[in-house]
Image: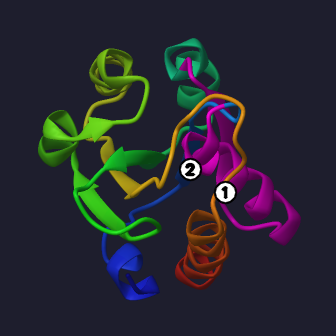
């Protein structure tokens, strides 16, 4: 994945949403990415929504964003650490790590709150989402790569 893959999907004000459980290994990818982006002071609204993104609907919509990027671990059927940008229709069929049901509800609520909202996801293939584990080296590397991609795409 390159910054141009992200840049061509962006329009207007951007909000990046990290989704995941930091207590379940690589499922903590989304929150870890948000933590990394906050250190870079990127030009985007950043939300660490943990495992309950629907609880952040109103604060997200209050940003008047035009583009929402969901960042999460998902079973992409590839090697650990590989990343893929997913459209909203692809997201519906993706096996997101621990919050499948809430993602559809969440995106539906966002789109109800703002017409024409551009929503897509960036998913990483986890190595393990076992309780009590930390992020794998492959997924940690993907956090660094995606941080750089977002910083460049949003510059």
* Image quadrant in which you'd find residue 40: bottom right
Mark 2 closeness class: few <14, some 14–19, many ≥20 residues within 10 Å: many
Q: Which residue is mark 1?
A: 33
The relative height of residue 52 versus residue 61 in the rendered view (above or below) is above
As helix, strand or loop, the secondary structure at mark 1 comes to: helix
Rendered image quadrant of residue 88: top left
Report x, y in % for residue 2. Answer: 41, 86
Q: Answer whether residue 44 is magenta in the image.
A: yes
Residue 154 lies left or right of residue 94; in this view the side is: right
Q: Which residue: 21% across, 41% down?
A: 94
Mark 1, other Cα within 10 Å: few <14 / some 14–19 / many ≥20 = many
Say if mark 2 contacts mark 1, CB within 8 Å: yes
Does residue 145 show up magenta in the picture?
no
Q: Which residues are magenta?
A: 24-52
Mark in front: 2 vs 1: 1
List x then y, in percent, for residue 154.
Answer: 58, 75
Question: Which residue was labeled with disc 2?
Answer: 16
Left or right: where 122 falls relative to 39:
left
x, y percent for residue 110? 38, 25
Which of 14 and 125 lies nearest the eye of the viewer?
125
Front residue (pair 50, 6)? 50
Instruction: State the residue at coordinates (27%, 22%).
Output: 104
Q: Which mark is residue 87?
A: none
Residue at 68% across, 37% down:
48
x, y percentage for residue 12? 46, 60
All told, the count of numbered labels is 2
Side of 102 relative to 57 (left or right): left
**Which quadrant is the C terminus positioned in?**
bottom right
**Residue 120 vertical position relative to residue 110 in the rendered view, above or below:** below
Q: Which is nearer the eye, 7 or 33?
A: 33
**Alpha-carbon distance for marks 2 and 1?**
9 Å
Please tell me whether mark 2 sits on a helix, a strand or a loop: strand
């Amino acid at each position: 994945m390159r910054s141009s893959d992200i840049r061509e999907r962006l329009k207007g004000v951007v909000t990046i949403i990290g989704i995941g459980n930091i207590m379940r290994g690589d499922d903590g990818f989304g929150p870890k990415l948000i933590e990394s982006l906050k250190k870079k002071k990127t030009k985007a609204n950043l939300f660490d929504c943990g495992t309950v993104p629907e609880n952040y609907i109103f604060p997200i919509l209050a940003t008047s964003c035009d583009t929402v990027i969901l960042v999460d671990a998902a079973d992409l059927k590839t090697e650990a650490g590989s990343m893929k940008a997913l459209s909203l229709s692809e997201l519906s069929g993706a096996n997101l790590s621990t919050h499948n049901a809430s993602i559809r509800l969440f995106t539906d609520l966002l789109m109800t709150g703002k017409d024409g909202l551009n929503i897509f996801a960036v998913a990483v293939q986890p190595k393990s989402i076992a309780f009590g584990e930390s992020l794998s080296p492959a997924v940690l590397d993907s956090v660094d790569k995606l941080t750089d991609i977002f910083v460049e795409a949003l510059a």
